[in-house]
Structure formats: C-alpha cells, structure tokens
Amino acid sequence: MFELPARMTQLQENIRAGHVSAQDALLAQVKRGQSLNAKFPCVVAELPLASHHNGPLAGIALAHKDIFQLNDRAPGCGVGMGLKHEGMAPATAISVLQQAGASQWATLVMAPHACGATSQNTHFSRCINPTDAGAAVGGSSSGSAVAVAAGMTYAALGTDTGGSVRIPAATCGLIGLKTTHGAISNLGCAPLAPSLDSVGILSRFPQDAREIWAALCPHMPRLTSQPSINCQLWLPKKGVTPLVAQAVRTWTAQLDARVNDIHMDESFDLLNRHAQRVLFYETAQTHHVALKEGTAEPSVQAIGLLGLGLPQRWYEESMQFRAILLQDFVNQHFGEADFLITPSLADTVPDWQTVEIGHPTFDRTALFAMHRYMGFVNYLGLPSLNLPIGRDARGRAICVQVLGRPFAEHQLLNFAEHSPFVFWNPSTHA
C-alpha cells in the first residue's frame, strides 16, 4: 500500500507526477481513516467511495462535519446517523469540492445542531483529543478537528457560528479558517443562526487549507506575500491568563512584521452584545417548534429560550447597525494594518471534564474561556484564522486567531504559512 505523505499538497504532487494513481491514493486514505477511527471514534457514517471530476483535488478523500446534505442523504446534525432522502442534492460546498475532484468517505460527529463550544454529545461516544487524551475537544465541529488531528483526513469542512471551527481547531492545534460570511454558500447546510453561520476549513497545514479554499472559491486571486506586514495586537485587559498572554507576546516578537498594541475592550463588549442578540434570536427562530414543544436539545434550549424572550426590536437594531459597525471596526482597529491578532482561547486548553456540563468538576469559567473571543467576529462577518503558536507545559496547543479584512483568506493563509511555529511535523504523519 502507498505510504501517505504528511501534507495533502504533497499527495497531490505525487498524483500529478504519476507516482501513485488517484484510486490507490483514495484507498490508502480511507484505509488509514478507518484504522484510526477505532482509537479516535468520530465517524458517524462511512460513504460509498466515488471518484469525481479530474480536478485539482482528484485522488483526495475527505471527511466532513455531518451538517451538510449529500446525494440522497439528509445530515444527522449531531443527533442521529443521517437519513436516506431520495432526490436530495448535496450542499453547495460539497458539490463544489466534488467538481474539483474530491471524494468524501465519511461524515463526522458534531455538537447537537451545531450548538456547543465543546464536543459534549450524549448521542455519540466522547471525542478524544489526538494531541492529549485528557484535553477537551472544542465544538461544534468536534469530529472534524479530531479526524484532522488524528490523520484520518487531510482536511475537513466545519461550520462556524460563534467559533465552531476555530474553537475545535484551537483545542487540537490545527489551522481553523472561518471564512468571510457569505463567501461560501450555506445552501444545503443545516442552519443555526443564518446571519452568523459560515462554512470553514480545518487542516494541519495552511497549504492544505489553501487548496480547499481555492477549490471552494476559485475566483479569489492567490495573492503573494507582501514584503512587509503590519499587525495590530489586542490582548484584553481582563480575561486572558498570564501564560497565554506571555506566549502571544513571545510569538509576536519573532514575527517578521511590525506589531502594534491596540485597545478595543469597549468595542469588543458592544460587538459581543450584538452577536449574542443575533445568535439567541435566530437560534430561537431556527428551532422554534422544538423549543415550544420542549423537545430541543439542552444546548439549543440554553440559548434558544433566551432568544424567545428577546425583543424583536433589539434583534432588528443589531442587524441594522451591522454594516456600520463593521466599517467602523475596520477603520478604527485595522487602520493601515493587514491583520488583527487576538488570543483564540482566554486560557490554555482545559481538561475535558472541566468543561463537561454535569460533570462533578465542571467549571463554568473554563467553558466561558473557550468561546469568549469568538462570537464578535461572526457578527462582523470577517475572515479569521486559528493558528497554533506554541505549547503549554503539558504539550497542549496555545493559539491565536488572526483576523483579516473581508475576503482576505489567501492573505491569512500566506501569513500562517510563513509564521515561525509549526505544530505538526511536515515530514511525518505525527
């Protein structure tokens, strides 16, 4: 059997050079994914393997969050195994990847209805973090993070409504790209809060994420790296632990870039309130029937019930001011800079029991620290990249999120590719 390289881009080169056939490459990826799933169970269902068009992703077998419609299959959305649905067309994002040549061999577990900052889910086995079995796995794209970190797939699609790509990426030391809102169609993707929902990408290496992004949005130009980079850095005055703050400082000092400190605590608080309004209200609308009947999942109830009591005028106000606040934010906090850097998590990655609701050692503060700095980005609709920058004393990832201007995904991936820390060894599977 062909030995798979560490990066998807390396496998693509081998296929193009004729060193391995696309079919043999597909079979090798599926075999590896199946064997690893026994140790890191995150597969909902295996799919019939089918090769598609002879595009740039020919011979690549991917696995994705079980939130997307597939051919003749409705998604399980973290509460079931998915249902056969004759005549159902695949989600736009899945269809575009198929047209680029990619195959999908499995669907992956997720937090129920994409509502949850951790992998907690009573319907499936507990997600195990491949980087540290005792560490939490973020949600809601939990299975996508586990599968990529374990090496079961080179990349996986997730969705991000309030950090659901970036949080699992941060807990597993991955690249997690939250795309510009609306850049990738959500058609065929089960909604949570449509005004915030974005399709995103998880991978171990930025080069692999770029190939997926380029296939999803081929019209976006692949801009080359700029000779000099300007970054703004926001380390909140309260909330971020000294260990995380010091790791961010150490990393930014190594950047080949100008880094300027900014203060945006007041802006953050305002934007966060607007983000919560939209999340609560739209979640309540999406799951209105289940909430009224008392059958909604606990995580959906937790925010959906708040949404049912939210005055509609508050929601309308938040939507009305959204574009204005985005422009003000870019003008005030980006200025002439290319990127805005913030911590991904307010603290280091916690033990899974610490953020498991109902567990004797559950700590609400630790759970809050996992999603504290995420939701305002979804309200603004900006692209954001989770990027591993170091490890704590236990070897768990410490990450930043890097915000870009609308549709700056290629620039974000360029930045990641030239950053001074690599969490994964590009020459091995580990």
Image: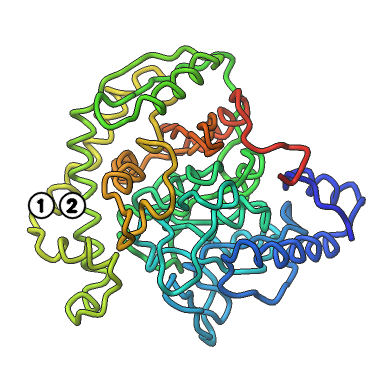
Determine whether, in the image, residue 229 is placed left or right of residue 163.
Answer: right
Q: Nearer the viewer, residue 189 or 170?
A: 170
Residue 297's label in the rendered image is: none
**Residue displayed at 18% across by 44% down:** 273
Q: Nearer the viewer, residue 49 or 204?
A: 204
Residue 314's label in the rendered image is: 1
Q: Nearer the viewer, residue 340 or 35?
A: 35
Q: Position of residue 156 (x, y in %)?
A: 58, 56
Q: Which residue is mark 2?
A: 277
Secondary structure of the residue carrying tag 1 is: helix
User: Residue extending furthest right?
Assistant: 19
Determine whether, in the image, residue 393 is placed left or right of residue 155.
Answer: left
The disc, 2 or 1, on the residue closer to the chain's N-terminal end is 2
Q: Position of residue 320 (x, y in %)?
A: 17, 46
Vertically, is 37 above or below 410? below
User: Residue extending furthest front?
Assistant: 360
Secondary structure of the residue carrying tag 2 is: helix
Q: Amino acid at mark 1?
A: Trp
Disc 2, disc 1: CB below 8 Å?
A: yes
Vertically, is 117 above or below 69? above
Q: Position of residue 110 (x, y in %)?
A: 46, 64
**Residue displayed at 18% across by 28% down:** 266
Q: Amino acid at mark 2?
A: Arg
- Residue 197's quadrant in the figure? bottom left
Vertically, is 273 above or below 298? above
Determine whether, in the image, residue 115 is placed left or right of residue 184.
Answer: left
**In which quadrant of the rendered image does the C terminus lie?**
top right
Of badges 2 and 1, nearer the viewer stands 2
**Residue displayed at 55% across by 66% down:** 108
Determine whether, in the image, residue 82 is placed left or right of residue 1.
Answer: left
CA–CA distance in space, label 2 to label 1:
7 Å
